[in-house]
Image: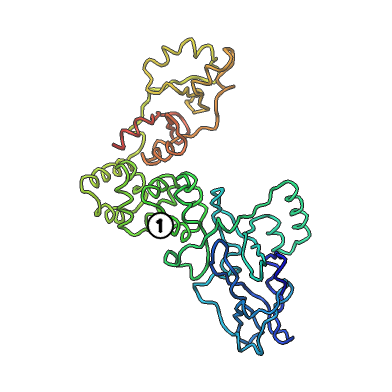
Amino acid sequence: MNTQLEQTFLLSTLIGKPAFIAGKKVGKISDLIAVESGKLPEVGSFVVSRPFGHKALLVPWDKVSDFDGRRLTIEATSPAEVEGEPEPAQICLKDHLLDKKVLDCDDDEVEVVYDIKLALRAGRLYATEVDCSRSAFLRRIGLGRIADLIGGLADRIRTDNTIPWTYVQRLPDTLTSFKGDLKLTVLKEKLPEIHPVDLADILEELAPAERLAIFNELPMEQASDTLEEVEPRVQRELISALDKKRAAALVNDMTPAQAADILAVLPSSEVDEILADIDAEDAEKIRHIIERHDEEIIHFSSSHAIELPPSATVGRVIGDFRNLARNADVVMYIYVLDESRKLLGVVDIKEVLQAELDQKLEEIMSSNVVWLNAKDPVKEASRLFKRYSFRAIPIVDDDERLVGVIPYRDIVNLSH
């Protein structure tokens, strides 16, 4: 075997290559087993599949007499000397990584692995990078020529999408019940550096088992902050799947209002189980807030807002603003209504001040309005405020007629 020059290979091109013993073909390469050894994992064995009725081969690297990427020559007198199957805890590069999701800790993004780059250095074979590029995907589905074209373009404009192996690390076996599948790889030491908002986006892209494995790795404070950022569906899945002691510890790390926002999505039996493990006074506060979360938002709304027709001009608004705002509970938004009180749009007062005096509200209003239905619960208002950072949200009836507004400050007061 040439041990002087470095050679590089793609895992996808090695799978299916023939394996020989004493000049006779005995099977095909079906996988490579990597062993963590320093910065890069080293290929410790080849898995060779054989025709039906014959046992698979597990060929240690020291039994490889020649390997050039086109064929594998095994140093043995018969296949029986190297028969074997991978152990469940071993990392099989094809079965455990290809087409699986990884976390690119450099960019804080979830990627899909389409190929793995390997390098033969000084007589040893190492996994060096995972390839998540479009060209790797095309190679996998048999469109190699197109893949080469895209790869050439990527080289010229530097849009290649590979992740160095140093940014990828296997999750500990104790954390996973994936039956040997390396469904997600992550550099654990990088997790505390990822902002909770970015981490929430990552968790939302993962399957439930992957999501839970990552979430269980987070320090308590980061887990608490991240849980607040994920969407309600994911909150419900995570809290329900967590050990109740850890769930209670997370809740204990939040304010009662924050805890109520999270627990409000759970069945009451699970809420009771979690609250049983925290301070009784805090638990009572959380229960009280949750109860109010289910009340209809209309009961807490105000009917005092600035309402004008679409034909009103900016000049009129500025000239009459003192009178318009005198009895209004919400003065930062102007609600544009038609004659039937149907909500047509909203104008931020800053937009009014920046517009021309002769412009009409219908020209500067935002018609893509986020609103609440009068029958929506308080918790839906909390969710929208959290998502959009509005200072107030309009409330409409089933015919989209304005019936009130709810200021952010009132939702905050309800949570305390």
Element class at badge 1: loop
130 lies left or right of 173: right
The mark tally for this picture is: 1
From the viewer's side, name the closer residue of 213 and 160: 160
| In the depicted structure, whether residue 299 falls above or below residue 168 | above
Quarter holding residue 59 = bottom right
From the viewer's side, name the closer residue of 186 and 341: 186
- The answer to whether one can see residue 249 in this image is yes
| In the depicted structure, whether residue 368 falls above or below residue 354 | below
- Residue at 27%, 56% in the rendered image: 273
Picture coordinates of residue 184, whole percent (x, y):
52, 60
According to the image, what is the colour scheme of the structure? rainbow
Residues packed near mark 1 inside 10 Å, few (<14), some (14 to 19) or many (20 plus): some
Quarter holding residue 145 = bottom right
Picture coordinates of residue 181, whole percent (x, y):
52, 68
Residue at the farthest front position: 4
- Residue at 31%, 33% in the rendered image: 413
Residue type at mark 1: give it: Asn
- Residue at 76%, 62% in the rendered image: 144
Specify the quadrant that holds the C terminus: top left
Specify the quadrant that holds the N terminus: bottom right
Picture coordinates of residue 371, whole percent (x, y):
46, 34
- Residue at 48%, 67% in the rendered image: 178
From the viewer's side, name the closer residue of 165 and 348: 165
| In the depicted structure, whether residue 108 falls above or below residue 25 | above
411 lies left or right of 163: left
Picture coordinates of residue 97, whole percent (x, y):
58, 64
Residue at the farthest left position: 280
| In the depicted structure, whether residue 29 falls above or below residue 341 | below
Residue at the spot of label 1: 216
